[in-house]
Image (spheres, helix red, strand yellow):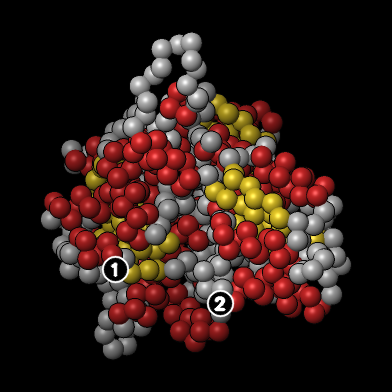
Amino acid sequence: MEGRYDYNRIARLWPDILRQRPFKMWRYRELLPLRRDDYQITMGEGGTTLMRANNLGMMLGAPNLFIKDERQNPTNSFKDRQAAMVISMMKEAGITELIVASTGNVAISYSAYSAHAGIKLWSFLPSLVPPEKMREIAIYGSEVVKVTATYDVTKKVAAQFADHRGILVDRGIRNTGTRESMKTIAFEVAEQLAAELGPPQPGVPWRTPDWYIQAVSGGMGPIGFWKGYEELYQMGLVNRLPKLALIQADGCAPMTNAFRKGLPHSEDVSDPSTRVITIATGAPGPAYDHLYDIMKEHGGVFESVSDEEAFRALHVMAKMEGLSIEPAAAVAFAGLFKLLNMGVINRNETVIVCCSGHTFPVEKFLLEEDWLKVLPASAETLAPVVPETPPPAPPSQAGLLGALDQLDQRVQQIMIVEDNPEAARLLRRILQTHGEFQIGEAHTGKEGLDMIRATRPDLILLDLMMPDMDGFAVIDNLKADPKLRDIPVIVITAKELNLKDRERLQGQIQMLLQKGAFMDEDLLQEIGALLGKNDEEK
Ligand SMILES: *Cc1c(COP(=O)(O)O)cnc(C)c1O
């Protein structure tokens, strides 16, 4: 079933009615295939930022670059639009159990939305999906089935299982809801670009970019995006259509390879060889044929990039624009760099890059070897000289001091200010078992303040009830001192706080923990976040 809509009516309705609706995916509900609004499953999907890439633009000499930041969706990829739409339609149809095959992000997104909707989900994943993504899927209560095969084989296994068990399997691109949901990216971009650059001509409210760039796998994103612009064009809300630039990884480029040869059907890849698993669809089927037809008629291009180019782009985006993106999203940016270099995209054109997903910090291979500063000193450098053995050459003064300097840089200092020695010991123990911290300990407020002034720790764990100077007074002193006021403070207290106490702490501290009512993980997590440490990496 293809979505059928009354475009004339909607074209008249939208300009006024949209002004009253929140900037979220469902504001476009007249052009989405859910019959009844009360079946909407929503977690805040869509309405993502369109950001001008100023630094990148300066670097590339391309002033009209915009990033559609789809990481801002509830599970951090643009699959949430699809999940919100499809799961809502399932709910409307009374379906209670569903199977999906995925390279990771669809399963994460469907799992979250299924949990929200009370639908049981089975996720079939190729074994190369990072274990962290698999755990993310499992935490939502989905059944996780790892198939030791490519994604294309995994899809077949899922379909067989569905058949065998009599459970519905998600039809992906062949599902109306999937394609229709992705139109909302086009609708948003059209509105957002008009807000940025003004309407293109009198009487035409919204705007079309010259290019939409996306990393492509199954093709739902661009097919939906294109359909969205076609509808806007038909309704007279924009005055032209964009061009698509779709990027694949060299190691799995069935669409790009076919396009380069001018073939109307994809050149399937049976043994993908790329680390960018998210977009490793080897057999895209009719999605390619459709995109090929669009490009024949309206221009546009398929391109591919190496994994190395993608990883480099990933670092550039993080360091130049502050966007931590997943390798699949980085493929789109690497494609942008390449197409600008090739002159396919003109540097003055208006370009939207779809930043399709957030990285998982756990994808360790993304960091260069030297991201962690490791102390170069060997055991002998620091150990006392043992008389019986021939003395090792004494380390040069500079070497040892250098080593100690680095040690100081790496080990972070935490000051515990707590009058109860038992409580202090517990805190020290929690810290010691979970990392290398330099821990100072003071047993009165006054002593604590003196030690903080002398050592300037990275973090303070503070009790409130202490003789002489209490915790509130310690905080007041810290905040009055420009050198100390930025040190984060975690208050750990046995005192029942009243409203006035809470107001005094408001905005002054990073976290409040009740003694005897917090887990060490709570504390460690907060400490980890405050110190910017990542437990996984040790
Ligand atoms: C799914 C996905 C893609 C590719 O999507 P298409 O279905 O080909 O449009 C790109 N990036 C991320 C992060 C994805 O999750």
- Classify 10 Å Cα crowding around label 2: few (below 14), some (14-19), many (20 and above): few
Labels 1 and 2 touching (C-beta < 8 A): no
Task: Residue at 73%, 77% (x, y): give it.
Answer: 504
Residue bearing mark 2 = 22
Q: Amino acid at mark 1?
A: Asn
- The answer to which quarter of the image holds residue 253 is top left
Q: Secondary structure at mark 2?
A: loop
Return the mark for residue 54: 1
Beta carbon at label 1 within 8 Å of ligand 1? no
Give residue 512's position: percent from left, percent from top. Answer: 73, 63
Task: Residue at 20%, 49% (x, y): give it.
Answer: 338
Give residue 334's position: percent from left, percent from top. Answer: 27, 49
Which residue is at the far left?
A: 343
Task: Residue at 37%, 68% (x, y): give it.
Answer: 51
Left-right relation of 302 to 38: left
Nearest to the observer: residue 39 or residue 131: 131
Height in image: 404 above or below 531? above
Left-right relation of 318 to 20: left
Query: How far apart are the alpha carbons under marks 1 and 2?
Result: 27 Å
Height in image: 390 above or below 509? above
Nearest to the observer: residue 344 or residue 237: 344
- Mark earlier in primary sequence (1, 2): 2
